Amino acid sequence: MAEKKVSSSLPAKLINGGVAGLVGVTCVFPIDLAKTRLQNQQGVQVYKGMLDCLAKTVRSEGYFGCYRGAAVNLTLVTPEKAIKLAANDIFRQKLSKDGHLPLWGEVLAGCGAGTCQVVVTTPMEMLKIQLQDAGRISAQRPVPTAAQAAAAPGPAPSLAAPPTQARPAPPHRPSATSITVELLKTRGLAGLYRGAGATLTRDVPFSMIYFPLFANLNALGRADVQAKAPFWQSFLAGCSAGSVAAVAVTPLDVIKTRLQTLQKGEGEDTYKGIVDCTRRILRREGPGAFLKGAACRALVIAPLFGIAQGVYFLGVGEAVLVWME
């Protein structure tokens, strides 16, 4: 009886969601960085695709350059994933009647979960995007030629030493703290919630697709749908539902990413809102631009939610609470 109480407790759900988020983000963050940089490309095509983006990032910024912004995600993903998974579970329990939840209840529970998580997701993604995209902006800056370097003021070149190629100045690397302080100073708390409407527009449909699809895939082949699913089924159900939902809302994710990006490259558009962003992307880049980063997004979300649901249903939080008792 005590074991059942622990397994249904909110602290256990929060621990499961937090652990799942930390493990998942660590595994897939470089692909998420590639997704952000590909989605933000407008005029100058610095990267040809995901692999090209990752290769150039490692070459110019080192291996850990692929984890720019990971600290923000790892710090805030625990409350974000905990809120999302726990809220969906609570809404499902409230909307269930005699252990049965109709499809409309599953969709409504997903909608509630997506709405609840925005309070953490918006500032997390706002900061993460600035850090992830800094390398792309730096890569667009022109490298000075040898003639320009020779004409620049400074000590005369040595006649004995061979001429060296001009190297670009090291890129400015903003930190999450400096971005946060600057936004709070110039725009107040609203600065951290820039693009909140677009985040909500993306996350609510995502959750409305993901959670019902996951629940039905997770129940396939089992007579007792109330029993805990095996790990492999939860993992595969999370991967499948996550990839479908991720691709479905990619156009909304592109709009959100563009709206939340503060530093723009040369010749790149700035936007006044969701409608203005949609119209400008259609006019300048065509409908295909709304699917930029779709493959990357599927490759991020599928394992992320597969790991999340696997950890959640393995009951790491329950084990921790039992151990503490």
Image: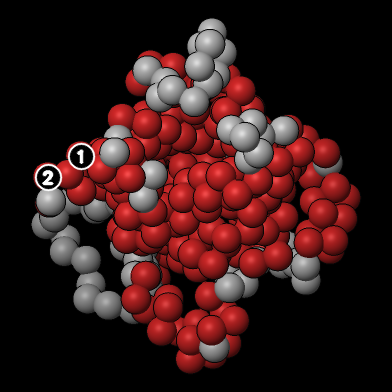
| 11 shown above or below 314 | below
Name which quarter of the figure residue 31 lies in.
Answer: top left
Contact (CB < 8 A) between labels 2 and 1?
yes
| Applied colour scheme | secondary structure
**Kind of residue sitting beneath label 1:** Ala
Could you classify mark 1 by the number of other residues whose Cα lies within 10 Å: few (under 14), some (14-19), or many (20 or more)?
A: some
The N terminus - image quarter: top left
Image coordinates of residue 262 in percent, x first then y, are: 58, 69
| Left or right position of 118 against 235 | right
Q: Can the viewer see residue 41 in this picture?
A: no
Image vertical order of residue 169 relative to residue 253, above or below: below
Residue 319 - label: 1
Q: How many callouts does the rendering have?
A: 2
| Place of residue 191 in the rendered image (x, y in percent of width and height, measured from the top left) | 57, 79
Helix, strand or loop at disc 1? helix
Identify the residue at horizontal 29%, vertical 45% (top origin): 6
The residue shown at (78%, 61%) is 274
Q: Is residue 172 above or below residue 23?
A: below
The disc placed on residue 323 is: 2
